[in-house]
Image: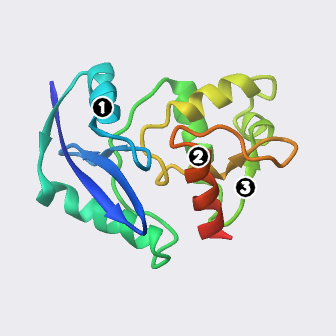
């Protein structure tokens, strides 16, 4: 079983859990969520959770730099895995430039599955590393802010940060 080291990051008025493995960032939680969010994810992907502030610190520093406007891109190694479809969607998200948005339909087209708009939404919702794989940059076709694992308020805040 993989061990995930975690800590809670508090920065820029936000607070969430971050989990890392020996290989990279594995989880970024929702603003204001308690430990139960991390534990539920840990059960689903079958990992052991261990508090370790020092192992998490380089990742927390990178995310903190993003949230305070000191950095726009992440160079953090990731340790995430999904289905081939999910991974294609996540790669399309990483390609969205800072400060820009795409619609669910545009992402579906970019991965060559223009009819899979709902499945794209589901894959986006399964993204385990909020902000770093920037699912907050995906909006509805009508330009409206739509659902977000971290909550619509968190999504709006991240979009304002990047505006």
Q: Residue at x 56, y 32 (%)?
A: 125
| x and y, in percent, of residue 8 in the image | 26, 52
Disc 3 to disc 2, C-alpha distance: 9 Å
Residue 64's image quarter? Answer: bottom left
Gap in angstroms between the C-alphas marked 1 and 2? 22 Å
Q: Secondary structure at mark 2?
A: helix
Is 37 located above or below residue 141 in the figure? above
- Residue closer to the observer: 134 or 35: 35
The percent position of residue 57, horizontal first and vertical second, equals 21, 62
Sequence-wise, the earlier of marks 3 and 2 is: 3
| Residue under pointer 1 | 36
In the image, taking residue 142 as reference, residue 119 lies left or right, namely left
Residue position for label 2 = 135
Does dot 3 land on a helix, a strand or a loop?
Answer: loop
Res 65 label: none
Image marks 1 and 3: residues in contact by CB distance under 8 Å: no
Q: Quadrant of residue 63?
A: bottom left
Left or right: 39, with 110 as reference point: left
Dot in front, 1 or 3? 1
Where does the image place residue 52, in percent across and percent down from the top left? Answer: 11, 51
Q: Of discs 1 and 2, which sits in the foreground? A: 1
Please state, as top left, top right, bottom left or bottom right, where the C terminus lies in the image.
bottom right
Front one among 41 and 124: 41
Residue sitting at 40 percent across and 32 percent down?
81
Position in image of residue 145 (x %, y %): 73, 47
In this view, 150 is above or below 123: below
Instruction: Count the numbered circles shown.
Output: 3
Q: Is residue 45 left or right of residue 51?
A: right
Describe the element under mark 1 as helix, strand or loop.
helix
Q: Give the residue at x 46% y 54%.
A: 132
* Earlier-in-chain disc, 1 versus 3: 1
């Amino acid at each position: 079983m993989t061990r995930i080291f975690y800590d809670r990051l508090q920065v820029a008025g936000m607070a969430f859990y971050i989990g890392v493995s020996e290989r990279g960032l594995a989880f970024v939680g929702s603003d204001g969520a308690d430990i139960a969010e991390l534990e539920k994810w840990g059960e689903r992907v079958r990992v052991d959770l261990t508090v370790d502030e020092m192992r998490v610190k380089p990742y927390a520093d990178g995310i903190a730099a993003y949230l305070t406007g000191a950095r726009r891109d992440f160079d953090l190694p990731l340790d995430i895995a999904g289905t081939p479809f999910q991974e294609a969607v996540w790669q399309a998200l990483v390609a969205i430039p800072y400060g820009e948005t795409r619609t669910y339909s545009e992402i579906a087209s970019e991965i060559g599955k223009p009819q899979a708009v709902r499945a794209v939404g589901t894959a986006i919702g399964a993204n385990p590393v909020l902000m770093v794989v920037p699912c907050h940059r995906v909006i509805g076709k009508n330009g409206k802010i739509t659902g977000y694992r971290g909550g619509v308020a968190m999504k709006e805040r991240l979009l304002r940060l990047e505006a």
